[in-house]
Amino acid sequence: MQTPKIAVLSFPGNNCEVESIRAVRRAGMDALYFRWNDDTEKLKDVDGYFIPGGFSYEDRGRAGMVAARDPLMDFIRSEAKEGKPVIGNCNGAQILVESGLIPLGEQLQMCLARNVVGGEAVGFLNEWVFITPTCARNRCVTSDWEGVMTLPIAHGEGRFVTKDSGLIDELRKNDQIAFSYCDAQGNVSEDPVTTPNGSAFAIAGICNPAGNVVALMPHPERTEGGSPYFVSLKRWVQNKVRPTFHEISRKGTGFTVGEKAAGAVEIFIDTLIVNNEEHTVEQAAHRLLPSLKLRQLRYLALGTGDPRTVLGTISLFNPNKEVAYIRRGGTVCKWNADAKQEQPVTDFPFKQGIKLLRRDEPDTGAAILGKGSETGVCYVCREVSEGDLLEKETLEVFANPHAASLSRLH
């Protein structure tokens, strides 16, 4: 029987290629290392694809967003439609969700959002968890094993969420909730001890309707205990046995852009050094809007806090790397960090252009600023029409509607 060959894809910023290749080989398969900008002709004889963990494009914009819009993913999408396995772990899972390959193959139906438990951010998690298959053994490419697997997690954005109220029920009916967090005895639970990232319904991994695409947040490639996950992949390729399934067709979640009036006291923070995230998000949007000129600013709207206190807190504002502008109604001042006072200005980075405010849900950064405060990211968009900018596909570059809101900031 021919040995399966699995291509391990590498985007800039991935850092799990070595252990992923090792895990593929340990399961008795051949591994091909493939860079994102290499010739896809080299992939003509591979049997499947593995997208490893790490921080593709430094998670700029949000985890997986940029890589999901890379031209290579158009090719991977076509391979998935032909039935070839596509597995994504951690950042690979984020890429698959952002590309729409998970859960239904098209459209942005979910988000792997920032880790939040009980409305509070829990930050980057680096610990061990238990998972168990919660689908039939033959349901997807990596589910042909039983029991409990102990695996490490290492992510800041691993919380499966969706605003499509009926989607989870559809996925359950179609047996697509492939893996769930559990305790040592296999009991699935949303308790933070069991599901430390706050993932909805304790979801750890999801497959597509055909079962050949799987997104999993924990890392089976980082431990020998995860070998059954990859052995299952080998059996799937060699046996060519496929589950019975039905396609799910859903309209998808629309993207409503709200309107936000100027607050009483707002702080816009720009960088003095090159803003690499700003540049990368702009490049991702250029596939849709080549003329777009983008500025990205941190946004703080104060409820009861004093801007002088905020701008004097190094964890909130670093005057060696950043410059701050304070807007009170229609008046904008620049913050002089040396003199610790506001100075009137006539030119500022958000003076012209369409301003879109992204606010993550929940807004976990606002509490430190005082009651009634808000935080977000302000995208100042120039040299583009409002109609083109407000197209759904373009807006999804700036925010995932399942975990954030966008408003037109006036």
Image (cartoon, helix red, strand yellow):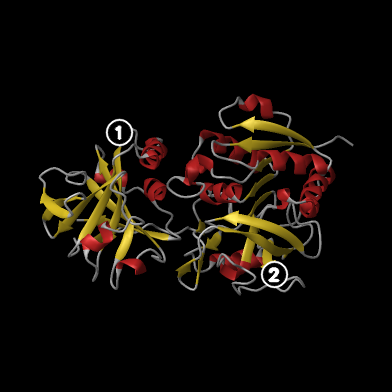
Give the side of residue 324 with respect to residue 176, left or right: left
Check the image and name the residue furthest to the front: 338
Measured as percent of width and height from the top left, residue 258 is found at: 29, 60
Q: Quarter holding the C terminus?
A: bottom left
Q: Residue at x 61, y 75 (%)?
A: 191
Q: Are marks 2 and 1 in contact (CB under 8 Å)?
A: no
Q: How many marks?
A: 2
The amino acid pointed to by label 2 is: Cys
State the residue position of label 1: 291
Measured as percent of width and height from the top left, residue 21 is found at: 73, 39
Q: Residue at x 24, y 37 (%)?
A: 383
Residue 217 appears in view: no
**Secondary element type, mark 2:** strand
Q: Which sits in the foreground, 290 or 242?
A: 290
The span from disc 2 to disc 1 (Cα, nearest Å) is 48 Å
- Label 1 neighbourhood size at 10 Å, few (<14), some (14-19), many (20+)? some
> In which quarter of the view is residue 54 placed?
top right
Instruction: Between label 2 and label 1, give the one nearer the viewer.
Output: 2
First-in-chain label (2 vs 1): 2
Measured as percent of width and height from the top left, residue 302 is found at: 25, 65
Q: Which sits in the foreground, 263 or 214?
A: 263
The amino acid pointed to by label 1 is: Ser
Residue 14 appears in view: yes
Q: Quarter holding the N terminus?
A: top right
Measured as percent of width and height from the top left, residue 14 is found at: 58, 40
Q: Residue at x 29, y 73 (%)?
A: 371
State the residue position of label 2: 182
**Secondary element type, mark 1:** loop
- Label 2 neighbourhood size at 10 Å, few (<14), some (14-19), many (20+)? many
Give the side of residue 245 with respect to residue 288, left or right: right
